[in-house]
């Protein structure tokens, strides 16, 4: 049924609406525009009509009972039957949010032979765990996972739903939010409860990381967020903690799922910044690909990983896998050493939660010093080799030798 209203007495048959419609829903019959069932009520033609002959009927928005939605949910991501650590980070923050609201924390575990993950979720703070144990959920596929979670949300009505911003989490969150017609804030760096309204305040970098935006979802439920790895700490695990396990059934059968997972090909030899306890990063100040040599040497002595700023990656000095920041990896190491990195907000968003930050830069006014625990103003090509030499002596590691 077409949604657009056309005043045939006012229509002049100019054809501007026909040219404007992106869906081909308008045609001219004689000197009058006619609309068909392809109309989506986008309104593009209404603004274009010089005769003001087009209009859309006022549509009453369906109201939902916001008070019926209670509790905080966390999706427990699993790969090959093992829960991913990003899920426990979400669980720790979910526990804080649930306590602020005075509501329960619930986990959603989807997989095959998944009981051990349900028990882990309770140990990490869940009051209740929804378990959907089915062969169709053994490996991640968008359709069966999304359909199952949508059914669970409609049945139990959570107020808040958190997912890790991994590749799977981003894919799943978008699919679920679309079907539920609710808002989704992606790649959050902060979550808290507004004390006055009880709404979830979701903070994330915006406009290329140049500002931090706080977003709320006042009219739809659940309030959905994805959060990047290493933004929140993993809470202490309590193996004696007790909780409720609720078993539910999968929504789709195998013959209803179009996609099949044939194999997994794991790339070897790539850097794993997310799990590194020590990271030594280089930025524009290293000057070129060779400038990462002292950075790599220091990282090797400390048993850490090599990171970089976006500027160094964009310049082609080091592969993207090493990039730390809003458009790279979010990290939370015990020690982060920034060498020749000025400290753009995009980079800070990815590393400022490190426990100890050491900044090395020639510019004493570099923004990186604003978040650093220790700052060294100097030439990194003098400071970094000196640090490497000192650490070698302290740690009893011999310098590499070259053979003829």
Image (cartoon, helix red, strand yellow):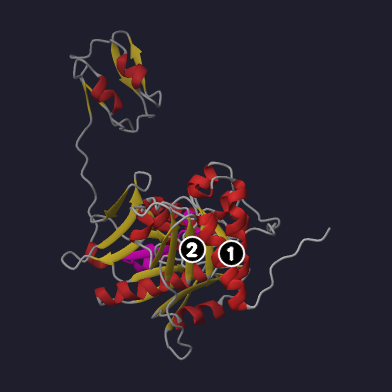
* Residue 153 among those drawn in magenta: yes
* Residue 131 among those drawn in magenta: no
Compare residues 358 and 315 and report the one nearer the observer: 358
- Residue positioned most to the top: 30
Check the image and report above or below for 225 versus 56: below
Q: Which residues are magenta?
A: 150-170
Based on the displayed image, in which of its 4 quarters is residue 246 positioned?
A: bottom left
Residue at 57% x, 45% y is 288
Residue at 68% x, 59% y is 269
Residue at 23% x, 47% y is 61
Check the image and report above or below for 376 versus 362: below
Mark 1 crowd level (few <14, some 14–19, many ≥20, 10 Å Cα):
many
Name the quarter where the N terminus is drawn.
Answer: top left
Image location of residue 34, percent across then percent down: 32, 19
Secondary element at image label 1: helix
Compare residues 299 and 2 and report the one nearer the observer: 299
- Residue positioned most to the bottom: 240
- Residue positioned most to the left: 196
Image location of residue 106, percent across then percent down: 39, 74
Q: Is residue 404 left or right of residue 206?
A: right
Check the image and report above or below for 377 versus 240: above
Q: Which residue is mark 1?
A: 298
What whole-number distance in Å separates the C-alpha atoms at marks 1 and 2? 10 Å
Name the quarter where the C terminus is drawn.
Answer: bottom right
Counting labels gives 2
Check the image and report above or below for 232 versus 370: below
Based on the displayed image, in which of its 4 quarters is residue 9 positioned?
A: top left
Contact check, label 1 and label 2, Cβ < 8 Å: yes
Q: Which residue is mark 2?
A: 337
Q: Which mark is residue 56?
A: none
Secondary element at image label 2: strand
């Amino acid at each position: 049924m077409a949604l657009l209203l056309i005043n045939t007495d006012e229509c002049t048959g100019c054809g501007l609406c026909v040219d404007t419609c992106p869906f081909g829903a308008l045609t001219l019959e004689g000197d009058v525009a006619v609309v068909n069932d392809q109309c989506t009520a986008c309104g593009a033609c209404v603004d274009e009509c010089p005769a003001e002959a087009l209009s859309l009927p006022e549509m009453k928005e369906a109201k939902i009972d916001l008070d019926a939605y209670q509790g905080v949910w966390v999706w427990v991501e699993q790969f090959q039957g093992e829960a991913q650590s990003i899920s426990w980070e979400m669980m720790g923050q979910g526990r804080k949010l649930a306590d602020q609201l005075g509501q329960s924390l619930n986990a959603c575990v989807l997989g095959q032979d998944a009981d051990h993950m349900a028990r882990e979720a309770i140990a990490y703070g869940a009051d209740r765990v929804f378990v959907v144990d089915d062969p169709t959920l053994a490996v991640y596929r968008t359709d069966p996972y999304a359909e199952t979670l949508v059914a669970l949300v409609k049945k139990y009505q959570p107020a808040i739903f958190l997912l890790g911003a991994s590749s799977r989490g981003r894919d799943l969150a978008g699919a679920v939010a679309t079907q539920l017609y609710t808002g989704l804030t992606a790649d959050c760096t902060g979550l808290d409860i507004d004390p006055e309204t009880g709404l979830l305040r979701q903070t994330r970098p915006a406009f290329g990381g140049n500002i931090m935006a706080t977003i709320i979802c006042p009219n739809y439920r659940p309030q959905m967020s994805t959060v990047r790895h290493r933004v929140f700490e993993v809470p202490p695990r309590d193996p004696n903690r007790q909780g409720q396990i609720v078993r539910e059934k999968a929504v789709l059968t195998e013959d209803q799922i179009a996609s099949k997972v044939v194999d997994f090909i794991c790339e070897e030899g790539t850097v794993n910044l997310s799990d590194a306890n020590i990271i030594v990063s280089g930025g524009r100040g290293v000057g070129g690909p060779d400038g990462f040599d002292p950075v790599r040497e220091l990282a090797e002595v400390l048993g850490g990983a090599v990171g970089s700023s976006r500027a160094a990656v964009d310049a082609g000095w080091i592969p993207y896998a090493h990039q730390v920041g809003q458009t790279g990896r979010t990290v939370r190491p015990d020690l982060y050493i920034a060498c020749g990195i000025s400290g753009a907000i995009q980079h800070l968003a990815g590393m400022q939660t490190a426990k100890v930050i050491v900044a090395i830069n020639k510019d004493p006014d570099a923004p990186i010093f604003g978040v650093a625990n220790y700052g060294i103003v100097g030439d990194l090509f003098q400071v970094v080799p000196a640090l490497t030499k000192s650490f070698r002596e302290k740690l009893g590691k011999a310098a590499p030798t070259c053979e003829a």
